[in-house]
Structures are given as C-alpha cells and as structure tokens.
C-alpha cells in the first residue's frame, strides 16, 4: 500500500478549519462560532481517499506560541509529520490572517492557502485575485467555501500535488537591509538543517526565540555572532528585533493587499447594522440579559414546562387519556408486569421506586432540555454568542478579567466538561486557573432539572415564573463577583489576558449543525440517565430501603425496611441514607435545609447534577407510596420549612462543586492536586455562603433572627468590601503583560 499522506489544517481561530475538516472527512467535529473550540488536534481520513490523513489543529494567530493550544499547533507543524499544510484563511479578514500565512510559508513546508468564506467575499462584492496572491506568496492559493463546498475538490487535488513535491525555500522577501542580516544568520545555522528550513530558523534566531538556539544546538560562539548581528540591526532600525520582523511582515502584507484585493465600495452590511445595536456600549449588556431571560423563560417557564409536567404527572404519575382511552402510567405498567412474572416485593420496589422513579424523573425533563438547547444552539450558531463574548470583554476588562474567560462560560451552558477544557485558550496561567474555578457556576444542562424543580416548588408557594432566569443570572453574577474578588488577591492578580476575536457575519445556522448541537447535548443527557444516574438510583434505593428497625415496636434488626414487622409509613427515616444524611445535615442547617433528604440530594448531586432530581423523585415516591401521588413539585416543596430554604438549596446545588466528570476535568486542567482542592473548596465555600445569605436574609425579612443572621451579614459585608476596595497597589504592575497576538 502507498504511504499515507498527512495533511494539516492550520489557520486563525474561527476561520472555518473544522467546517472544512468535517466536510472532507465526514466527521462531526464541533463547529463553534467562537475561537478556541478546537483545543486539541483531531485526526481523520479523507472520505474520498482513505490514504489521506487530515489533522484539524487548534486555531493560532502566529507560530510564536503564547498559549498551550498555539504550542500544540506549532509543535505539530514543525514536528515533521505533515506532508502538506493547508493554511485555511478567513478571506473576509484577509489582512490579519495573512500574518500567520507568511509564517506558515516560511516554515519551508509545502503549503496550500485556502481562501475560505469565498461565499461571503462574493456577497460583499470584494474581489481577491488568487493567482496574483499565489505568485506573491510562492504557494498555490485557491478560493473555497467550506460551508457551501465550492472549491474544496480543487483544494484537495492541489494539496496532493504539493505533498508530492519537495519542500522549497520560501519566496517572499523582506526589506533588503533585513534580508542581508538574515542571510548572514543563515550562514550560522548548522549545516545539518536542510535548505528549505534555514530561513525559518534564521528568522527565529533573529527574533531571539529562546527555544530556537536550543533546538538547533547552536554553539556558544555562533550564538554570540547571531546576537551581535541582531543587536547591530536593532541599533540601525532603532527598534527591537521582534518588532522589526513584525513590521516587515505587515509591510509585505500591506503590499499584497494593495496588489491582490479590490474592495467594493463600502456600504454597511446587515451584520454591521445589527452589531451597532447588539454590541452597543450601553445597550449590549441589557440586550444580552433580555435574550437570556427570554431563553430560560421559554425553556423552563412556558412550553418546556407544559411538556415536562405532562410527562411527570401523567406518564410517570397517574396515567393519562389517549383518544378517550385511559392509559396506565409507566410505573403502573412496570408494576403489573413485575407482579405478573412473580417478582418479589423487593425487586418491584427496586425497579419501580428506585430506577423508574429516579431515571424517569430525569428523563421527564427532556422536553425542557430540547427547548433550551434549540434556543442556545441557535444563538451560538447564528453568531450572536460571539458578540456577547465581545460585549463581556468590555465589562470584564474593567475588573481585570478578559472576554476570553467568557467563552468557557458560554460552552458551560451545555456542559461543564468542555467548558473547563475551553479554558486552554487562556494563555495567562492565573486567569486560566481562575476561569477553571468559576466557569462551572454557569448552569449546565444537567442543572436545568434542578432549576425546573425549584421553580415548580416555588410556584406552588408564590407566583414567580421569573425564578428560572434568575437562577441562570445567579451563575453569571457568581462568576463576575468571584472574578472581581479573586483578582484582588495575590493568587490571581495580574493584567487581563488580551482578547482578539473575529466576529463572523450573522448567518442562519445550517439546520444540520444546529440539529447536531441539540442532539449532541440531549443525547449526552439521555446516555447519562441510563448509565450514571441509573447506577446512582440503585445505590440510593439500597441506602434508603435498608436500615435498622428502631421504631417503636421495632426489633432493632437490619434489613429491607418495607418488609419488616410494624413498619411505619415514614420508614425511610430509619434507613442508612437517613443516618448518613442526618450525620452531615448540620452543615446545611443555617441554610434552611437540614432534613436528611435535602442533604442526601446535595451529596448525590456531586456524582451528577441530575441526581438531585432523581433522588428527590425516589425519596418522594417512597414516602408517598401509600398516598395518592401528589405532584413532584408540591411534595418537594413540602420538604422545606420555608421558601428561603428552597432558594438556598437551589443556590447551593447550582454553585457548589460540579459533578464527578467536571471535577475530573478540573483536576486535569489544573494539573495540580493543590489547585484542584483550591477550586473545589472555593466553589463549595462560595455556594454555602450564598445559600446562607439567601436563607438568613429571607428569614430576617420575615422577622426571624439568630446568630446566623449576624454571620450572614458579616459575610455580605466582607464580600462588598472585597468588591469595592481598589485594586491593591502593584497587583498589575508586578505581573508581566502578556504580548497580544498580532492585532
Ligand atoms: P475553526 O475555529 O477554524 O475550526 O472554525 P469553524 O469551522 O468552527 O467555523 C467558524 C464559523 O465560520 C462557523 O460558524 C462556520 O459555520 C462558519 N464558516 C466556516 N466556513 C464558512 C464558509 O465557507 N462560509 C461561511 N459563510 N461561513 C463559514
Ligand atoms: Mg475548530
């Protein structure tokens, strides 16, 4: 068999690499409308020819890496594996994208430049002369649309042709004075370096790239000679070496733009008109809040609820009518089937009160989940969310945070695991750690059932449908408040990470990728229901049905409680779970939920957030097995003494340490046990304090005071102090500024 051909896709973030990758390999990689979605390289074979291996690399602005994912890309390109690099270029942002193109061409690797988004360029009326640009760059250039598919076949055949060729010396030249110096440095590059790569290394040495001397194994004498040449040139140009090269690149690019691009007369595009409003300095933020309010309101308070209520009350509750025929509910069907096959009472209880109740409650929230993700995915795919990151950057920056921290949070609205992974794009380590710590405050899909349950419970007691969006904003506020507070501590002080992002024009999402996003998230939820939630319900069933008969007249024996002599209606109070929950319930007493049930829910929620609802349903199902089934909502509300307790329970469970999977991801990202502990400790502590304040202030408002009221006020004062006090002196100056990528 012929040798495999390796094609690497490289380009700026958000230029369409993954779209192209998916098109030519038939994969379903995540196409996001913001940078940093592809944080690891991904490999697949060409659909039309399995001997071609394509690698989708994380987006980069330059080959002088600043962030971990930029390093992934550079190391892969320079590692010798790719036979040809396809440099994907966002042709609507040609000038900026060419900066990386020049660097990629300089590597001496065979390169094909793909001018992507040709459809948008055409729409704008601009004309890019690909042939001229190709002559200038010395590599083939082809216009394509990864989205529509035009030009892609030609791109592939060009890439094959180039891969078969030998590497060549890059063609473009800087100013002759600089070229002279580069020539001299090239002479000093060890003879073992092939001709095609010599210029690349000469430029690296000129830029004083720290790792270059090392990788080349340059002798001290040669290194000193290089330094002398560079220093002399710096003196002549009155500028530092790195800026000289950057300047030369931009000069070349300006020249190429002049020669190869004909701009259509300027008129404001629809996208620009929309952006004037939604990214407006004053209106941007309120619009975002209004949009998110609408999303959560629609998903949880209206359509979604109707469907979910129906599922929970009828399908899993009392049965329902279909075309005038009475249909039994799922638990009834399962129960009668189990009785028919002669299952024991214990097995029936495990299946009906354990698994069906728990897993069923989780599945019952699917309608709300679908509505939520249809709306969120639309906002993401059409380009709005990218604007929000931009708007948020302006807000965050005032507090020393960066819009880069907002992107992981957007991703976290789906799931905290990719959210935490998305922090890789943040090059400043302190900012990255802080974002890892706070990003899971944003409610993920699995927290939606908790919000819905709380809302149902609260609506039972007060008429407040606006509660659902409120819990979402609680997450956003928690992130901002934490950010401001943490930035003022030694651990996290420092300049905000620079944030540069192309805003793609608005477009109606392709139905395929839209549906795919929704399906990806909903199917992950369903899969979890049948795996981890299923397993958890079995464990919770055991813990809540087994215990010691210590009630009046009880024998003191340990066993299956419902089958025991003289079992009281509230038998779960004697279970192992009640004992375990009761043992730690004191922690939550000041928060207004000291019942062992509420504690048990919070603890199982650490395994997976859906468990909060699954466990609630199980415990309620058991408790009410003998009565007519009240709805999940009112039964849940009945477990708390006050509305304050319900809200505090919600706040604690939404903000405390995330599920096991996300905790594991935090551990990987932090790459340190100490930092993982700091992150989880902070999350739990913060959640507890917020819960405390909610409950105590609620109680105070109803005229109930205790020593905890004082504690809550003290915490509130501390938070306010940390929020309003000025940035400690020297906090920013100490920290080195991170160089911005080519702007
Ligand atoms: P990556 O970050 O380089 O992997 O970029 P993605 O593949 O995730 O694409 C970023 C955005 O650009 C997505 O919203 C795509 O739908 C959009 N996009 C990609 N290629 C094209 C194209 O050829 N035309 C248009 N109009 N949009 C595109
Ligand atoms: Mg990508």
Image (tube, grey):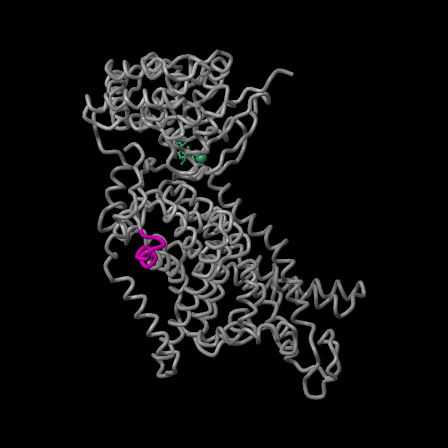
Where is residue 421? Give x, y as percent: 47, 45
201 horizontally vs 535: left or right: left
Residue 173 in the image: x percent, y percent? 30, 14
Which quadrant of the render holds ligand 2? top left
Residue 591 appearing in the image: yes
Residue at the far front in the pictured view: 221
Which quadrant does the N terminus fall into?
top right
Q: Residue furthest bottom?
A: 553
Residue occupying the point 47% across, 67% down? 456
Q: Of 595 and 433, which appears nearest the observer? A: 433
Q: Could you tell me which residue is drawn at 44 percent across and 18 percent down?
A: 109
Left or right of 90 on screen, residue 649? right
In percent of width and height, residue 159 lies at: 47, 17
**490 inside magenta stretch:** yes
Residue at (36, 74) in percent of width and height: 712
Asked if one can make out residue 330 in the rendered structure from this viewpoint, the answer is no
> Which corner quadrant of the image does residue 185 belong to?
top left
Which residues lie in the magenta part? 484-493
**Left or right placement of residue 731 versus residue 684 in this view:** left
Q: Quadrant of the C terminus?
A: top left
The foreground one among 684 and 332 is: 684
Q: Main secondary structure of the magenta part?
A: loop
Using the image, determine if residue 618 lies above or below residue 201.
below
Nearest the viewer among 171 and 20 is 171
């Amino acid at each position: 068999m012929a040798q495999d051909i390796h094609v690497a896709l490289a380009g700026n973030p958000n230029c369409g690499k993954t779209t192209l990758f998916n098109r030519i390999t038939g994969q379903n990689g995540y196409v996001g409308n913001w940078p940093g979605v592809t944080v690891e390289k991904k490999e697949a074979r060409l659909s039309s020819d399995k001997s071609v291996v394509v690698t989708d690399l994380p987006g980069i602005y330059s080959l002088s890496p600043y962030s971990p994912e930029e390093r992934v890309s550079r190391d892969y390109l320079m590692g010798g594996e790719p036979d040809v690099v396809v440099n994907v270029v966002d042709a609507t942002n040609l000038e900026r994208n060419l900066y990386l193109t020049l660097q990629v061409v300089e590597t001496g690797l065979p390169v094909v430049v793909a001018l992507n988004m040709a459809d948008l360029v055409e729409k704008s009326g601009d004309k890019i002369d690909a042939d001229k640009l190709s002559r200038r760059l010395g590599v083939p250039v082809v216009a394509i649309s990864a989205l529509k598919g035009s030009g892609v076949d030609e791109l592939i055949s060009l890439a094959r042709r180039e891969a078969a060729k030998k590497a060549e010396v890059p063609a473009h030249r800087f100013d002759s004075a600089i070229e002279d110096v580069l020539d001299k440095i090239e002479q000093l590059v060890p003879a073992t370096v092939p001709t095609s790569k010599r210029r690349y290394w000469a430029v690296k040495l000129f830029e004083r790239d720290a790792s270059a001397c090392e990788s080349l194994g340059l002798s001290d004498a040669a290194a000193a000679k290089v330094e002398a040449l560079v220093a002399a040139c710096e003196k002549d140009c009155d500028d530092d070496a790195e800026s000289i090269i950057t300047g030369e690149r931009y000069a070349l690019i300006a020249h190429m733009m002049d020669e190869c691009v004909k701009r259509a007369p300027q008129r404001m595009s629809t996208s620009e008109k929309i952006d004037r409003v939604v990214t407006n300095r004053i209106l941007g933020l309120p619009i975002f809040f209004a949009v998110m309010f609408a999303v959560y309101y629609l998903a949880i308070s209206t359509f979604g609820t109707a469907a979910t209520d129906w599922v929970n009350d009828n399908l899993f509750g009392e049965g329902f009518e279909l075309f005038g025929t009475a249909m039994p509910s799922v638990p009834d069907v399962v129960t009668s089937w189990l009785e028919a096959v002669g299952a024991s009472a214990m097995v029936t209880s495990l299946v009906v009160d354990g698994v069906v109740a728990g897993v069923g409650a989780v599945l019952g929230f699917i309608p709300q989940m679908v509505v939520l993700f249809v709306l969120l995915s639309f906002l993401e795919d059409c380009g709005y969310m990218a604007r929000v990151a931009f708007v948020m950057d302006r807000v965050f920056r005032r507090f020393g945070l960066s819009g880069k921290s907002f992107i992981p949070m957007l991703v976290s609205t789906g799931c905290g695991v990719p959210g935490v992974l998305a922090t890789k794009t943040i090059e400043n380590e302190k900012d990255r750690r802080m974002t890892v710590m706070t990003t899971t405050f944003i409610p993920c899909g699995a927290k939606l059932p908790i919000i819905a349950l709380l809302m149902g419970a609260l609506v039972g007691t007060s008429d407040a449908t606006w509660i659902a969006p409120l819990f979402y904003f609680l997450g956003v506020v928690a992130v901002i408040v934490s950010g401001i507070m943490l930035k003022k501590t030694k651990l996290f002080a420092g300049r905000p990470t620079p944030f540069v992002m192309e805003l793609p024009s608005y477009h109606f999402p392709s139905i395929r990728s839209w549906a795919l996003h929704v399906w990806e998230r909903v199917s992950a939820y369903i899969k979890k229901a049948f795996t981890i939630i299923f397993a958890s319900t079995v464990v919770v069933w055991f813990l809540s049905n087994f215990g010691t008969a210590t009630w009046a007249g009880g024998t003191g024996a340990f066993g299956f409680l419902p089958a025991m002599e003289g079992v009281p209606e509230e038998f779960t109070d004697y279970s192992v779970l009640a004992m375990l929950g009761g043992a730690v319930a004191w922690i939550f007493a000041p928060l207004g939920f000291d019942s062992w049930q509420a504690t048990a829910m919070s603890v199982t929620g650490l395994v997976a957030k859906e468990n909060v609802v699954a466990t609630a349903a199980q415990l309620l199902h058991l408790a009410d097995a003998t009565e007519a089934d009240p709805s999940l909502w009112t039964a849940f509300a009945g477990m708390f003494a006050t509305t304050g307790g319900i809200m505090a329970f919600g706040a604690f469970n939404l903000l405390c340490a995330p599920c096991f999977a996300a905790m594991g991801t935090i551990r990987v990202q932090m790459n340190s046990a100490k930092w993982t502990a700091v992150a989880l400790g902070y999350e739990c502590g913060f959640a507890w304090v917020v819960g405390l304040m909610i409950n105590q202030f609620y109680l105070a408002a109803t005229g109930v005071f205790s020593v905890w009221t004082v504690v809550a006020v003290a915490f509130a004062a501390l938070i306010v102090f940390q929020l309003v006090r000025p940035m400690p002196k020297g906090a920013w100056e100490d920290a080195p500024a991170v160089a911005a990528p080519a702007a």
